[in-house]
Image (cartoon, rainbow, N blue to C red):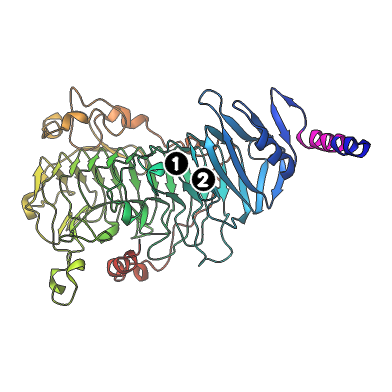
Amino acid sequence: MKNNLLLTFSCAVLLLLSCGKTNSEGIYVKDFFALNEAIGQATPGSEIVLANGVWKDVQIKFYGIGKKEKPITLRAETEGEVFIEGQSFLHLGGENLVVDGLYFRNGYTPSSGIIRYKIGADSVANNTRVTNCVVEDFTQPSALSGDRWIEFYGKHNQMDHCYIAGKGNDGSTLMVYHDGNENTDNHHQIVNNYFGPRPRKGGASAETIQLGDSETRLTPGRVNVSNNYFEACNGDVEIISDMTNYNSFTHNIFYKCEGALVLRHGNFATVDSNIFIGGDESNLYGGLSVMNTGHWITNNYFYKIKGKEFRSPLAIMNGILNTPMKGFRQVTDVVITYNTWVDCQSSWQIGIGQNKASADVLPVTEIRSEPPIRSTIANNLIYNTHVDATPVVNYDDMEGILFKNNIIDNNGSEYSEYNVLRNEKVKMKQVNEWLFAPHEEQNEILNDVFVGYGFGRIKQDLFGDSRSKESRVGAINQLSTAEKFVIDKKKYGPEWFSTEKIAINYNLPNDSLVEESELAKYMEQDKNR
């Protein structure tokens, strides 16, 4: 009896020494044993505090049932001073959890997901938030080993103000799964994050964000991807691959990324007020690629995007008649209005992928013969400081598109092919290195806008100015507001982690090797998406 009492007392002392005292600052834990004890005992409102230092080879399974007003929190003692290293991961399950301030580095996950909103086979997380964290170069030793760093399951989960960069192996950086009803129609929030450099991989399966797959093309997602900063995300032709429905992509900045925001299998997407910044260093900087139906593409700004075909500033694909699940669906019922392209190369490329000439040798399921139909391109502005001989490239038939009140200033060179653009002299002010905005006295030119069905839903311009009383062609309604806009990288990722220190070589070699037959190679690899 005495031995049992002594053992019980000894265990209690060890637990007290490991966990520290429970107070208003939470349950302080110093080792993995104490952490698991604290997780097992957590109740709504509990706060578990990880001691500063290196936590190596810790495979954390954070399960708990919190309440909306009293979540269960797992946080760093000091933001950015709790280092998760070695073969480690953080998997989440339950309800109303919060993770705050962790730094993953010098290691890799031995299982699926570094941060995973699911434990094991079936314990998903709901209403759970990961914030203020860093995952830096936490990549597999072999570039051929595939994994996903961030895996979203469940519903109403969020990742915000995190820094994610340096994935060098196969697999999407962030994946939203839609396996079963418990994971779909999920309303996840991916906001205010910094997605940093990812090296070229070539071909498919190196997306920065992937929402679903070809088997979920009819599935509702309602994921919000907004106010994120993407820099040098060069792993895949698709920076973001949208493969579910009703998702929103708004107020994101894509800075010198060799890929595109691709509406791959998704329908009814909202693509509003995003900024795509390219440059002269690479011919692979991409813009927006459109497939499928029902998208609203509004108030987006493109600067020096020079990619071809799939990486075009605006790429509108041809579809496949009676397409298989993994094929391209015909573009229908899409609205593209109030967008601006500045110094881009062939800003609009329409009917990309058209391969009718090969119909005799291809299976029917691979013939991209269906051009876009029942769609509207209106109130857009193309402005070039150097003449672009081919601002519009048409690979097939554009008769199914209604073109209304689109303006081009091609540096004094008249452009009349296809009769889809009106030539005007537009006085623009260069606000900064990449931002050009129209002077406000040009009302007669820019205020002549087409108001189509449903256009009343477009309430604001790129920078938040109202369109309700007066609306102008292009993404920018007011020069005065544009002049105040600056990119503040501190808004993206954790406040304690500086993204300014990142050294990126934008003078990337061998663009021609990547470009050569790129679309054909991509289509072949893409069959398994």
Q: Position of residue 118 (x, y in %)?
A: 51, 45
Give the camera-side residue of 159 and 156.
156
Q: Nearer the viewer, residue 326 or 410?
A: 326
User: Residue 450's spot in the image, x, y percent?
Assistant: 10, 35
432 magenta-colored:
no
Q: Earlier in the sequence, mark 1 or mark 2?
A: 2
**Which residue corresponds to the image point at 41% horizontal and 43% vertical from the top-left?**
183
The answer to whether residue 331 is left or right of residue 111 is left
Viewed as shown, does residue 181 lie left or right of 293? right
Q: Which mark is residue 154?
A: 1
Q: Residue at x 62, y 28 (%)?
A: 43
Q: On the image, numbered disc 2 is attached to which residue?
A: 118
Which corner quadrant holds the N terminus?
top right
Q: Given the image, on which type of amino acid does mark 1 rest? A: Gly
Q: Amino acid at mark 2?
A: Lys
- Element type where label 1 sits in the image: loop
Q: Residue furthest front?
A: 1
Distance Cα–Cα, label 1 vs label 2: 8 Å
Q: Are marks 1 and 2 in contact (CB under 8 Å)?
A: yes
Compared with residue 433, is residue 214 higher up or lower down, i.e. above or below? below
